[in-house]
Image (tube, grey):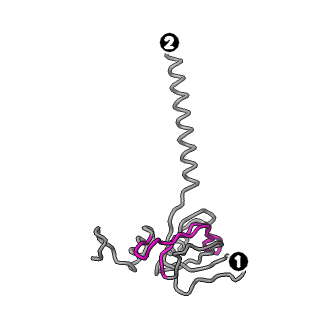
């Protein structure tokens, strides 16, 4: 083989190896930072992984909010009207957080099936609901599907 062709082939192989390593590292980083959404039913059925950061959402059950008197610890129950999951959070809840409204919490499940949240997101007005929560409630039959114009059928 011609020495010039050998050199070109070696350069191409080194470039391909570098690209493969870069793609592998990028995929590894994405895999570690992905937060999959789980409904309370999926969590109660054991489909959600323990000790992995996940997103869980649903409606906050009325009367389930318990605040600690001497700290920022909060505990509440989120439901998709089929099953429920308890969420514990330490911090200040969003201003729009209310019982009976949709939320999404980010955190890890402990061994008892309780979500230890490090972030709680509340809807920004009374008509908005996170898409994942809307889909979960529609699938459970608790929410009527909306048509494309946003009016109820």
Q: Quadrant of residue 147?
A: bottom left
> How dense is the environment of label 2, judged by Cα within 10 Å: few (below 14), some, or many (20 and up)?
few
As drawn, the label of residue 71 is 1
**Disc number for residue 2:** 2
Q: Residue at x 46, y 81 (%)?
A: 81
- Residue 69: x and y in percent read 70, 83
Counting residues from the start of the chain, the first of labels 1 and 2 encountered is 2
Determine crowd level at label 1: few under 14, some 14-19, many 20+ residues with C-alpha closer than 10 A: few
Considering every residue shown, the one lying at the far front of the view is 95
In the displayed structure, 134 sits above or below 32; it is: below
Numbered mark located on residue 103 in the image: none
Rendering coords of residue 74 (x, y %): 63, 78
> Which corner quadrant of the image does residue 136 belong to?
bottom left
- Relative to 2, is 108 on the left or the right? right
Residue 51 in the image: x percent, y percent? 63, 64
Q: Is residue 114 magenta?
A: yes
Number of numbered discs overlaid on the protein picture: 2
- Circle 1: element type: loop
Compare residues 19 and 60 and report the one nearer the observer: 60
Residue numbers of the magenta segment: 100-129
Q: Residue at x 67, y 76 (%)?
A: 73
Q: What residue is drawn where x is 61% and y is 69%?
A: 117
Q: Quadrant of residue 150?
A: bottom left
Residue 2 location (% of width, % of height): 50, 12
């Amino acid at each position: 083989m011609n020495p010039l062709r050998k050199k070109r082939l070696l350069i191409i192989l080194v470039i391909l190896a570098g690209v493969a390593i870069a793609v592998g590292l990028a995929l590894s980083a994405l895999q570690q930072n992905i937060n999959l959404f789980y409904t309370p039913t999926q969590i109660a059925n054991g489909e959600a992984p323990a000790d992995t950061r996940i997103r869980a959402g649903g409606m906050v059950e009325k009367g389930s909010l318990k605040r600690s008197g001497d700290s920022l610890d909060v505990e509440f129950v989120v439901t998709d009207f089929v099953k429920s999951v308890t969420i514990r959070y330490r911090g200040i809840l969003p201003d729009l957080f209310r019982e009976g409204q949709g939320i999404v919490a980010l955190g890890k499940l402990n061994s008892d099936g309780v979500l230890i949240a490090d972030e709680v997101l509340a809807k920004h007005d009374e008509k908005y609901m996170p898409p994942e929560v809307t889909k979960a409630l529609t699938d459970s039959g608790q929410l009527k599907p909306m048509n494309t114009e946003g009016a109820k059928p």
